[in-house]
Image (spheres, grey):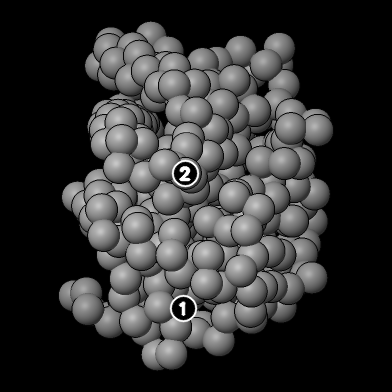
């Protein structure tokens, strides 16, 4: 019997299981690959694909941190994004800081891979360090890390898994993991299947004292980018996981305890497929709404242009300064006049929070929160 209370120091190094001849997995792999390819093509329809840094990737960051029981409201989060964008103010709310660090870690990893499209241990540690705002590396051998059931679950506090312990063991397993991801000659397997298998392995190694879940979910997106399956790391995988959280952890543990790979891989491929469908719907809705808004606004407002249209769809809450930057205007009187025109034509809605007035794009909020 597998002993959940003892360190799993016998965790095998990765040598992919015999899943490529499994008919159910192959069928799901085809549909997941097709759905993911549609997302990638759709991203190129956006006038500026990086605009999703403040929309879809923000939703991914918020939901991924919620999986770790770190919760924020949309109001708090969008307000903080707007403040940090305009004023570079330090964020005080700990939960908001966690979400923003997740997003920044995702995009810092993305920029690193643009220069060198290879998943490395240094990259993984860098992601973890940014998420947790630390400079530490893999957990030290004396750290008695265990995975327990949450307070809302049956038998709260019960140990469900104890990851490997020991500096050499963790180092060897992580070295093997990055070779598995990068060396397609030694491990000639479809990249989506590799992602599924490697995600299990990373969570089983649990190399850091905290933040492993978030680091692992970022690693999934970055790996898809590194293999050319996503041109931007904007897939909203965390929503699927949080909606199926019990199933996710059950199938993860089943691999550890019974080497039950098929249900786990089918679960992860289904996550990719359904997440791709949702992401496509979001991208289509954003593009359609942007086009409708631009066609309407350019007839109503003389100074309205495509750059302004992109700006008001770049994040749900904005301040006048960002409009001023695009139009190269800094006069408060002039900006007030412009913002009033946007409000009068129902393109934005003012909302006072404390002493500051934010301008909300209700059309974008509806799409993001739908």
Residue plotted at (55% across, 86% down)? 92
User: Is the residue marked by circle 1 packed among few (<14), some (14-19), or many (20+) residues within 10 Å?
Assistant: many
User: Is the residue marked by circle 2 packed among few (<14), some (14-19), or many (20+) residues within 10 Å?
Assistant: few
Quadrant containing the N terminus is bottom left
> Are the two marked residues, 1 and 2, in contact with CB atoms closer than 8 angstroms?
no
Dot placed on the residue nearer the N-terminal end, 1 or 2:
1
Residue 166 visible to an observer of this rendering? no
Residue 59 against residue 133 in the figure, above or below: above
Q: In x, y percent, where is residue 233?
A: 53, 38
Residue plotted at (28% across, 82% down)? 151
Residue 311 against residue 267 in the figure, above or below: below
Which element is circle 2 on?
loop
Image depth: mark 1 or mark 2 in front? 2
Circle 2 is placed at which residue position? 303
Q: Is residue 270 left or right of residue 36?
A: left
Residue plotted at (34% across, 56% down)? 342
Q: In x, y percent, where is residue 198?
A: 54, 37
Circle 1 is placed at which residue position? 95
Q: Is residue 351 left or right of residue 40?
A: left
Q: In x, y percent, where is residue 134?
A: 73, 73
């Amino acid at each position: 019997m597998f002993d959940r209370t003892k360190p799993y120091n016998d965790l095998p190094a990765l040598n992919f299981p015999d899943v490529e001849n499994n008919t159910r997995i192959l069928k799901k792999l085809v549909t997941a690959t097709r759905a993911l390819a549609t997302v990638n093509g759709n991203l190129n329809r956006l006038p500026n694909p990086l605009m999703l840094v403040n929309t879809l990737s923000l939703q991914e960051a918020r939901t991924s941190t919620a999986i770790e029981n770190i919760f924020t409201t949309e109001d708090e989060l969008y307000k903080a994004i707007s403040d940090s964008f305009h004023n570079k103010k330090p964020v005080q709310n700990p939960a908001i800081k966690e979400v923003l660090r997740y997003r920044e870690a995702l995009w810092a990893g993305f920029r690193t891979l643009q220069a060198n499209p290879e998943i490395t241990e240094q990259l993984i540690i860098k992601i973890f360090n940014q998420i947790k705002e630390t400079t530490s590396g893999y957990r030290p051998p004396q750290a008695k890390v265990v995975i327990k059931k949450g307070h809302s679950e049956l038998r709260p506090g019960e140990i469900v898994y104890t990851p490997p312990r020991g500096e050499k063991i963790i180092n060897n397993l992580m070295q093997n993991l990055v070779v598995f991801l990068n060396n397609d000659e030694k491990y000639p397997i479809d990249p989506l299947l590799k992602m599924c298998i490697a995600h299990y392995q990373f969570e089983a190694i649990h190399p850091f004292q905290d933040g492993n879940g978030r680091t692992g979910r970022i690693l999934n997106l970055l790996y898809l980018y590194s293999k050319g399956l996503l041109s931007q790391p904007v897939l909203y995988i965390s929503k699927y996981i949080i909606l199926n959280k019990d199933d996710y952890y059950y199938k993860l543990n089943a691999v550890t305890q019974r080497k039950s790979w098929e249900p786990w891989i089918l679960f992860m491929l289904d996550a990719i497929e359904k997440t791709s469908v949702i992401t496509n719907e979001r991208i289509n809705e954003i593009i359609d709404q942007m086009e409708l808004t631009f066609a309407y606004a350019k007839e109503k407002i003389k100074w309205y242009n495509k750059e302004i249209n992109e700006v008001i769809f770049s994040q749900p809450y904005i301040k006048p300064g960002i409009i001023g930057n695009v139009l190269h205007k800094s006069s408060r009187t002039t900006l007030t006049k412009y913002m009033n025109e946007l409000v009068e034509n129902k393109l934005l809605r003012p909302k006072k929070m404390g002493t500051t007035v934010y301008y909300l794009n209700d059309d974008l909020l509806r799409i993001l929160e739908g």
